[in-house]
Image (cartoon, rainbow, N blue to C red):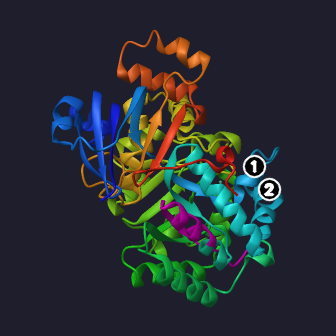
């Protein structure tokens, strides 16, 4: 049996911090015991250590913070190479930069290389699980899942469905989209730590027949997810109103198609009213809040307070390449600022929840990941709260765990990720170790 133990300060959410003070557990001198890639025990060193065999290797992470691996609820694998593309808003940005980058994935070798680089970049930033858009090429999902399998990562991804309003090379007829998606689900869903998400890109790129393909796949496979974009940008929303005149609003396009349900993860939802939020809640659908993307593309300020008050499940998404960082620590900081602009305060534990257990709930994976309770898969990070000179100086005056975490999310990024463990095994960064 492979087992190990990690000693250090431990922080994780047992529930939504809104549920009360017990929802967040901080253990100043903790011990995390891992067996066969899963958490076997967690608690104070004093309590847990006596039950651990003397032969077990214990790594002592002094002056560090052990937290669950971060979970990115919305990210595009083929777009990492065109992050920070200047000067456009959503629809022009897609035409100018995004679709060409996705067309380059037609080349299998390029896609395979990019997929591996993408997953290593996620891990380098402390993200151990993500909900990922591939491209419309079937092999884009194969290369991502092969790369995830090689790293033993828990990953959810899907082939992008599009049959209009995009370059011909990325489009396909609905019947082919159905057959290829079905084959991918059968090949990959549930294998290792992999899961499939049916992925219609967004309403403007899908005919009603293509949306119907997505609905039929969801019907046929009751535990796959659905991921798409919703009400991101005003010009996009106006286009949707023209393309679907029968729909009462953007969400209604998906609702009519049978795509609004408890397995649906909608990216953005910037331009929604209370009625739409109520329908999302009634369906138990989830939102991926992507602050850096919304700021970068000038899409608008997500009404985080209204979404929380409506009781929606919410997670954070980096939305690379429209987002400007793969770091969920930095994304927590940007979420705070976006909420501030709408007069809502996100405290540090709440932001941390959005990137860990809350995100696991968005992905319906809270039984497997999201915190470090016994039985969960042992995806965790060792953070250095004083990773930079500025952080180190500022942490000296932090008076509480919450304040220290807040400083980390406002000033921290991938530099604060000291070590990443995937299913209990330490991930070694190929950029540092020189692995091919
Ligand atoms: N809407 C449709 N496709 C995309 C995409 O690739 N990125 C973002 N941010 N929005 C989209
Ligand atoms: Zn997106």
> Which residue is pictured at 39% across the width and 67% down the height?
261
Which stretch appears magenta? 143-164
The quadrant of the rendering that contains the C terminus is bottom right
The quadrant of the rendering that contains the N terminus is bottom left
Q: Nearer the viewer, residue 205 or 29?
A: 29
Label 1 environment density (alpha carbons within 10 Å; few <14, some 14–19, many ≥20) = some
What residue is pinned by disc 2? 92
Q: Nearer the viewer, residue 239 or 246?
A: 239
* Residue 270 seen by the camera: no
Label 2 environment density (alpha carbons within 10 Å; few <14, some 14–19, many ≥20) = few
Q: Nearer the viewer, residue 179 or 313?
A: 179
Estimate the x, y position of residue 169 in percent, counting from the top left: 79, 77
| Above or below for 372 versus 202 | above
The count of marks equals: 2
Q: Quadrant of residue 140?
A: bottom right
Local secondary structure at mark 2: helix
């Amino acid at each position: 049996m492979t087992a190990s133990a990690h000693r250090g300060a431990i922080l994780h959410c047992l529930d939504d911090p809104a549920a009360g003070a017990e929802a967040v557990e901080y253990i100043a001198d903790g011990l995390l015991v891992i067996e066969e890639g899963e958490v076997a025990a967690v608690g104070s060193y004093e309590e847990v250590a006596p039950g651990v065999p003397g032969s077990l290797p214990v790594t002592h992470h002094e002056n560090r913070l052990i937290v669950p691996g971060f979970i990115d609820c919305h990210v595009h694998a083929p777009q990492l190479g065109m992050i920070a593309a200047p000067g456009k808003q959503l629809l022009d940005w897609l035409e100018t930069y995004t679709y060409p980058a996705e067309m380059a994935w037609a080349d299998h070798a390029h896609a395979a290389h990019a997929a591996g680089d993408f997953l290593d970049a996620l891990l380098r930033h402390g993200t151990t699980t993500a909900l990922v858009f591939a491209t419309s090429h079937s092999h884009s999902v194969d290369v991502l899942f092969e790369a995830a399998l090689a790293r033993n990562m828990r990953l959810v991804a899907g082939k992008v469905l599009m049959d209009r309003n995009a370059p011909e090379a990325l489009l396909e007829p609905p019947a082919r989209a159905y057959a290829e998606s079905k084959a991918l689900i059968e090949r990959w869903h549930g294998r290792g730590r992999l899961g499939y998400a049916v992925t219609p890109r967004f309403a403007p790129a899908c005919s009603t027949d293509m949306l119907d393909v997505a609905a039929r796949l969801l019907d046929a496979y009751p535990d796959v997810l659905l991921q798409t974009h919703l009400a991101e940008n005003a010009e996009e929303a106006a286009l949707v109103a023209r393309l679907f005149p029968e729909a009462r609003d953007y969400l209604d396009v998906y609702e009519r198609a049978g795509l609004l349900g408890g397995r649906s993860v909608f990216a953005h939802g910037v331009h929604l009213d209370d009625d739409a939020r109520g329908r999302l809640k009634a369906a138990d659908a989830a939102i991926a809040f992507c602050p850096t993307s919304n700021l970068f593309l000038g899409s608008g300020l997500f009404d985080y307070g209204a979404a929380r008050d409506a009781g929606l499940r919410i997670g954070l998404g980096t939305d690379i390449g429209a987002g400007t960082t793969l770091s969920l620590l930095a994304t927590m900081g940007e979420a705070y600022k976006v909420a501030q602009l709408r007069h809502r305060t996100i405290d540090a534990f709440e932001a941390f929840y959005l990137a860990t257990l809350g995100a696991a709930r968005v992905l319906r994976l809270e039984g497997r990941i999201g915190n470090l309770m016994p039985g969960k898969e042992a995806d965790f990070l060792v953070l250095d709260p004083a990773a930079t000179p500025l952080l180190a100086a500022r942490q000296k005056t932090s008076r509480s765990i919450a304040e220290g975490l807040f400083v980390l999310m406002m000033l921290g990024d991938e530099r604060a990720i000291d070590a990443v463990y995937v299913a209990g095994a330490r991930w070694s960064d190929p950029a540092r170790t020189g692995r091919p």
